[in-house]
Structure formats: structure tokens, C-alpha cells
Amino acid sequence: MTEPELIYEDSDMLAINKPSGLLTMPGRGGLASAKSALSILRVSRGPLFVVHRLDKDASGLMLFARNAEAHRYYSGLFETRDITKKYLAAVDGLIAAQNGEIDKPLVQGGSGRVSVAFDGKASVTRYETLEHYKNSTLLEVSILSGRRHQIRVHLYSIGHPIIGDRVYGDQEKQKQWPRLMLHAYELKFNDRNGKKQAFRADPPKDFMSVLPFL
């Protein structure tokens, strides 16, 4: 597993490219002592605040705040959806539509697993088809809400689980893939000074190397 790649740094925040397999922050129980992006960055950058999370098995862009005021501001951007987030997702099966929207409420169970439920929280995911492979489709995905496992659950709910997803896909089938094929590649927002920021992180080698086999 590689270390986080620093994309941008100023007095308020850090933007990094997190590798697949690395926790955002230390977990609970058996994961309490596991290496995380937060623990690694704190060694060289000092105190940091987690602004948002990215699934352990996903890769891509993340923001960390460097002080309490910045944490309130950037966390607020995510809560009010005043930030643009785009992902790349390779999914099982061929999606014929050029684009689509999945509008299904989500609820989290006691086990941490998320599912579609009529009484869940409103959740909207949009996708655009980028490329078809033999038995799979590469999508650009954006979310209008930020629920736990939202992209993974929504795509699974329409019969197209993300390649390598052993939670929301056929576990036996997904074991053949080395990673979850979900990568957060773009973030756009206005910083605390009103300056427009746009960060982009290309998919890592362990993502790109899977595509020829899909």
C-alpha cells in the first residue's frame, strides 16, 4: 500500500490523493491501531481535522483542515452540497444509457451495511457512461448527497455493482479483482477567501491496470 500523495497545501487545508486500502482515520475495535491517512499526515503536518471520508477500499481526493475555523467552513461546504465531487466507477455489466439518475433513499443498518428504504434519507446519484468493455462499464459519477456507501449501494440497486465490491456484490465473483474500482478524481469549491479551487487526481496504476481485463 502506498502513502497518500499531497496534491495541494495552504494554511487552511490539505488536499491528498488517498490510495486504495488506506483508512481515512483510525477505526474502532481491531482497526483502532490501523494505519490511516490522518495518522500518516499528522506525523509531518501536525494537527489536522477530517473534513469528509472516503471508503477504505476507494482511492482519490480528500480534504483535511488545518485549524478549527477551516474545519467548520469546509465541513459546511459538504453539508450544504456547495462542493462538486466527481468519481470514476467501473461497474459490472453493460449500461446502455448514456446517462442516468438514481433517486433512492438510503438507510444504514446496525452492521454498517447500507440499503435502499422508503423511509431512508434522500439520496441522489447521477452517472454518465464513459466507456464500455466486454462485460462492464466505466462511469463518471457525481452525488447530490453524501450518504455512507451511497455510490456503491445505488449502483448495486440497479443491478450494476462496482467491480471489486465485496460488500454490495457477489463476493465470490468480486474476489478476482484486486481492489474496489471507485476513484474520487475531482473536487471543485470556493475556499475561505472566495477563491475557486479545482483539484484533480488521475486514477492510480492499480485502477488503470484492471481496465484491460474488464
Image (spheres, rainbow, N blue to C red):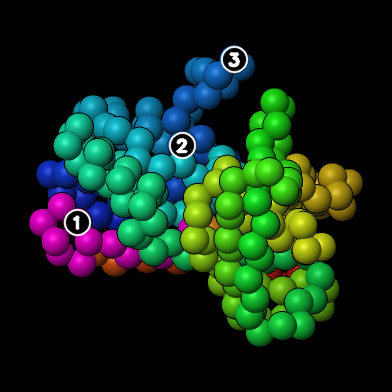
Q: Residue furthest top?
A: 29
In this orientation, does residue 155 appear?
yes
Residue shown at the point (47%, 65%) measured from the top left:
86
Disc 1 residue type? Asp
Residue shown at the point (17%, 37%) measured from the top left:
69
Task: Find disc 2 in the rendering and name its residue.
Answer: 24
In this orientation, does residue 133 appear?
no
Disc 2 residue type? Thr
Q: Main secondary structure of the magenta part?
A: strand
As drawn, the label of residue 191 is 1
Q: Position of residue 157 (x, y in %)?
A: 77, 57
As drawn, the label of residue 49 is none
Q: Earlier in the sequence, mark 3 or mark 1?
A: 3
Disc 3 residue type? Gly
Residue shown at the point (39%, 56%) measured from the top left:
81
Residue shown at the point (11%, 56%) measured from the top left:
193
